[in-house]
Image: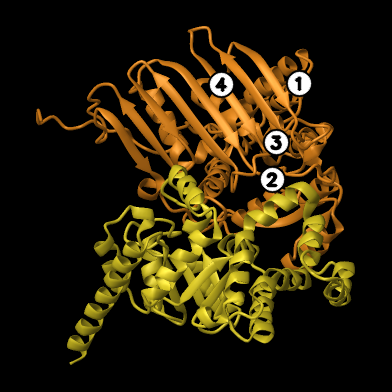
Chain colours: A yellow, B orange
Amino acid sequence: MDRIVFGDNQFFGINHMSEEKAQSQAERFKDDDAILDVIDAARACGIHTFMFSTHERVVGLCDRFRARPDKYSDLKLCPSIPYAYKYANAVNEKGILGAINEFVFSGQGAGKAIHTIIRGGMSVINKDMIEVMKLLVDADMRMFQGLNVQAVFLQNTVTDMLLGFHVKEVFVEYANHISKTYGVDPAFNTMNMPDLVDFLLDCGIENPIVCSSINKAGFAMNPSRHAYERRLADGRFRPMAMSVFASGAIRPREAVEYVCSLPGIQSIVFGASSRSHIEQTRDLICSCWEEMRKSELAQSA
Amino acid sequence: MDGQPVPSLVWGAADSPELKCHVLKPSVEETVMLRGGIVGFGRMGLTHFSILNTHPNVDFVAVCDSSSFVLKNAAQYMGIETFTDCERMFRTMGLDFVVVATPTAMHADVAECAIANNAHVFVEKPLTLHPEQGRRLLQLLQGKVLVHQVGYVNRFGDVFTRVKQLLDSGAVGQVLTFRTEMNGPTVLHGSKKSWRSKKKEGGGCLYDFASHGVDLVNYFFGPPDEVVGTVFGSIHSDGVEDTVSTTFVYKGGMRGNLLANWSDPSYRKPSCQFEALGRMGKIIADLHSYKVFFSYAPNLDGFTQGWNQRSYTVFATPVRFFVRGFEFTRQLDYFIDCIVEGKPCRISSFEDGFTTDTMLEKIRTDGESRGH
């Protein structure tokens, strides 16, 4: 995984600081071209790994990536599935099974739909949630077909709800399905990093990629920043840090210095809307990491 | 500066109940384990289950639902007993508490069953469809030492608890007008498949969606003396309303408006905005942040004259286990704390739920009297 991963919250009206700011971002990125301009700016800054939710807008972006293989061959994508609100709204309207049917069979030609029915038919009859989960994963992954996928993340609402269920089979089967079907690492977004990492290790999922909020303000670090720091020190997983700036609650240098000082952080995920902001953040992360590396070398010498 | 310390509000849930019930609090050596059940294993039921299943004082043992898909998987993967009849569940499982997350029309019957079986009870919002049902539940609770709570989750939100304290502190002066607005993309098609599109089951924008906004008004100001000018509107639904607008009038002169629309595709998720104008200032709040305008130098918590903005990224405190929002865990942990510590529920109790139900009823009858 690259040291810097570019996130997509800003494109789809997600901002933890204020709903007002989220709204203005949604307005700014109403056209795919506006999003692609920022993606191109990030690539020009040397950032090639992008985490994408499966927001319906991402379908159009992936079409654009596929249409220009000459331009976008450098892209490494990290889908975060599923886009929870898409399901929540469908469940409201159609009930749980109605929503599953809609997503499993939508966007497929007749031939593929029959294939899905043959594979999924038994699971619908058997009503097995793990088989249904695999069908939903495949349905969400369809939009990334033919693109370079690095790892597939389970979105945090789903990860955390399933974590609360304490059902190991779901995590084991998800991990197996991602590595067998897509040939990449399974990964997890969470708001409960210490509990999740311990649980994944208990499940026998070795050295998992786990992305969570990690910031000096302790924002969205449940149950506590201290528990996160302890879990990071224990290792045995590949941590990625997001919400590093807590949506602007911490000064940038202080925010990045804190995260770079923690043991084992593999990558920092951040989102930005302008080239200058991307450059500044990239430079800050690179310089903090470099300083950290130098001080480690000095200590070991 | 005059060198005087700046007074500050003590932020946090305004709750300091005296002990009333029998105390279940464990000695140092033992941990109280409460046997829990859940009725209604849909979206909210699954959320509540996930949060409470990780609670150190909870052992979830039973689930009741009508869906064979849900029950089969709950039994197979979660190892809990499954039921389609909640009376049987109570009879056979000896439950300490139950979470009720069924369609609203069933809340009263299930809660009554819980009370009859001496189980503490948490009911999703709104409490009931008819205030007389809520009144009956309160009568049944008389003389019982049972914790009862309704899922008005905004009362546990980081922003709205602070707004409540600001209003109660009098910092913005006597409130003259307020506005509560809720919007979301909950219903964007004319589907008839969900209970949410059936009035008899408690569907419709008013009960299923706007009830959060109505309860926020109850939480901040108490029930109004009059509800006027209610208009229901339809966008996609046939049998239920998709929009609600109404006006609350208070004897002291305060008045407020509620606007709700659950069929607005411009929103990514349900949103709730609140605004209050007082004689000395104004508050504008949503789920993530709030702004306060003071027409004077308030000498309070770092606030200054003019506009002040605060975001929950700065003041939100983490929770034991997070699913979907800090407030979801806080409300359930409060419920369990009340049971374990033997204290009555003081935040979003059945009494609060009943008052909000009476407000919902007034809105409904006012709207229907206008032929909507």
Number of marks in picture? 4
Say which mark, if any, is on residue B99: 2
The disc, 4 or 1, on the residue closer to the chain's N-terminal end is 1
Report if the CB atoms under discs 4 and 1 are less than 8 Å apart. Answer: no
Q: Which residue is depicted at the point 50% across and 48% down?
A: A27
3 and 2 marks on the same chain: yes
* Cα–Cα span, label 1 and label 2: 21 Å
Subunit of label 3: B
**Residue B225 horizontal/vertical position (percent):** 59, 11
The disc, 1 or 2, on the residue closer to the chain's N-terminal end is 2
* Cα–Cα span, label 4 and label 3: 18 Å
Q: Is residue A283 visible?
A: yes
Q: Residues within 10 Å of mark 4 (few under 14, many from 20)?
A: many
Look at label 2 and name its amino acid.
Answer: Val
Look at label 1 and name its amino acid.
Answer: Glu
Name the foreground residue: B75 vs A45: A45
Report if the CB atoms under discs 3 and 2 are less than 8 Å apart. Answer: no
Report if the CB atoms under discs 4 and 3 are less than 8 Å apart. Answer: no
Report if the CB atoms under discs 2 and 4 are less than 8 Å apart. Answer: no
Subunit of label 1: B
